[in-house]
Image (cartoon, grey):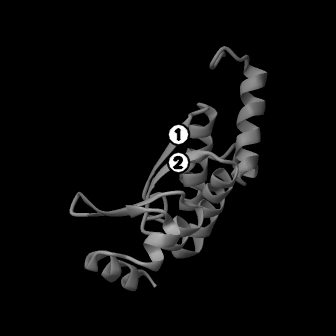
């Protein structure tokens, strides 16, 4: 087996390192049906990282998770942000967006309603719709 011109041993070591990084190396031999939603999301992040992407895309990565599992995924994503990884994230997790983003874009009905740096955007929302949205997420 060769993946990205690496031999089997390198691939397995790399996969285990990524599973360790996302906190589920102990689940390396489990089938997906035996993983929680948070573990499945973290496995997906590890799979994506294995491709060595320049940009990571996340579309509501926590939306289908039980509330107590959300932090597991956000913790991994926060670590990616802290290492300087470029990510494009669609989320309703406003605290997370405010804390880790360099730029936030608020869309309403598919149209950009506000965009800017998180500190300014969250402190002084210009549109009524964004103010309403923020009030509903607190």
Q: Answer left or right for 114 relative to 35.
A: left
Q: Closer to the N terminus: mark 1 or mark 2?
A: 1
Residue in view at x 27 percent, y 80 percent: 128
Up-down relation of residue 13 to residue 105 (above or below): above
Q: Residue 16 is drawn in which quadrant?
A: top right
Does the rendering let one see residue 103?
yes
Up-down relation of residue 129 to residue 23 (above or below): below
Q: Answer left or right for 88 relative to 108.
A: right
Element class at badge 2: strand
Where residue 80 sits: x, y (%)?
Answer: 65, 51
Residue in view at x 61 percent, y 32 percent: 52
Residue bearing mark 1: 55
- Residues at marks 1 and 2 touching, judged by CB atoms closer than 8 Å: yes
How far separated are the C-alphas under marks 1 and 2? Answer: 5 Å
Say which quadrant the N terminus sits in: top right
- Residue 10 got which mark? none
Residue bearing mark 2: 87
Element class at badge 1: strand
Comparing 17 with 35, the one in front is 17
Bin the neighbour count of mark 2 within 10 Å (Cα to Cα): few under 14, some 14-19, many 20 and up: some
Bin the neighbour count of mark 1 within 10 Å (Cα to Cα): few under 14, some 14-19, many 20 and up: few
Q: Residue 127 is drawn in which quadrant?
A: bottom left
Comparing 76 with 128, the one in front is 128
Residue in view at x 39 percent, y 79 percent: 134
Where residue 34 sits: x, y (%)?
Answer: 59, 54
Q: Residue 9 is drawn in which quadrant?
A: top right
């Amino acid at each position: 087996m060769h993946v990205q011109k690496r031999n089997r041993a390198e691939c397995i070591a790399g996969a285990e390192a990524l599973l360790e990084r996302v906190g589920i190396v102990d689940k390396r031999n489990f089938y997906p049906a035996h993983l929680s939603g948070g573990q499945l999301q973290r496995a997906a992040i590890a799979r994506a990282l294995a491709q060595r992407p320049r940009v990571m895309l996340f579309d509501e990565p926590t939306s289908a998770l039980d509330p107590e599992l959300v932090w597991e995924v956000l913790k991994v994503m926060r670590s990616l942000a802290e290492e300087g990884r470029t990510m494009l994230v669609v989320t309703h997790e406003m605290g997370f967006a405010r804390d880790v983003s360099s730029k936030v874009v608020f869309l309403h009905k598919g149209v950009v309603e506000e965009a800017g740096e998180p500190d300014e955007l969250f402190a002084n929302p210009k549109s009524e719709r964004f103010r309403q949205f923020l009030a509903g997420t607190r």
